[in-house]
Image (cartoon, coloured by chain):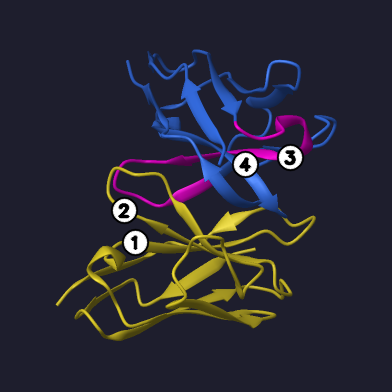
Chain colours: A blue, B yellow
Amino acid sequence: EGQLLESGGDLVQPGGSLRLSCAASGFTFSSYAMAWVRQTPGKGLEWVAGIWSSGVKTDYADSVKGRFTVSRDNSKNTLYLQMDSLRVEDTAIYYCAKDKWSFALDIWGQGTMVTVSS
Amino acid sequence: IQMTQSPSSLSASVGDRVTITCRASQSISTYLNWYQQKPGRAPKLLIYAASNLQSGVPSRFSGSGSGTDFTLTIGGLQPEDFATYYCQQSYSGLGVTFGPGTKVDIK
């Protein structure tokens, strides 16, 4: 069974930037699409971004398109989320997750908290 | 694609049969997944492709449906099943969206 460990969450001012990382272990990282999903505490789940196994193809939620960039380094078994022009409404727990089938997500990290506030 | 779930919450007793419905705003074939989430924990995949049980998930969980209407059934609620349940559509080319969730608590 694989594991995912997110890092990089922090308190940042509106308009600022942050990069999240997700270290994968226990499975062949380069063979699977990966995703970022976020959750405002006490609220529901929101798809943020997905990236296919090669890293060539990506997909974003409309709410983050043009501000967030998902990438991966298959040599380091690591997934990234570059977040620019952050807004108060981006405040959430950010989870990375592994794709099982068409973005059915079977392995999740523990989440990292991002707070956007002045 | 918009996803709706009903009910938004329900109260049930141990041993009850529970059914949660998820509806998509347009046809998604069987690109529908179900997750369970407990407070302070990451979501857990229960069912993928509408009716396939994820490895390690108890057989009291089952899913059905295709097109726009889907159902998650818990056949005999156990104490560890009290949680929030989310559906998710992942129909190719139309983005990925989650339903708003259904909270199952103890009656």
Q: Amino acid at mark 2?
A: Lys
Question: What range is drawn magenta here?
Answer: A26-46
Q: Are marks 1 and 4 on the same chain?
A: no
Is mark 2 in CB contact (under 8 Å) with mark 1?
A: yes
Label 1: which residue? Answer: B84
Q: Amino acid at mark 4?
A: Lys
Q: Secondary structure at mark 3?
A: loop
| Residue at the spot 61% in from the left edge and 75% down from the top edge | B51
Judged left or right of residue B85, residue B66 is right
Is mark 4 in CB contact (under 8 Å) with mark 3?
A: yes
In primary-sequence order, the first of circles 2 and 1 is 2
Distance from Cα at disc 3 to Cα at disc 1: 27 Å
Judged left or right of residue B2, residue A87 is left
Label 4: which residue? Answer: A98
Distance from Cα at disc 4 to Cα at disc 2: 19 Å
Judged left or right of residue A104, residue B20 is left
Q: Residues within 10 Å of mark 3 (few under 14, many from 20)?
A: some
Q: Which mark is residue A82?
A: none
Question: Label 3 lies in what chain?
Answer: A
Q: Residues within 10 Å of mark 1 (few under 14, many from 20)?
A: many
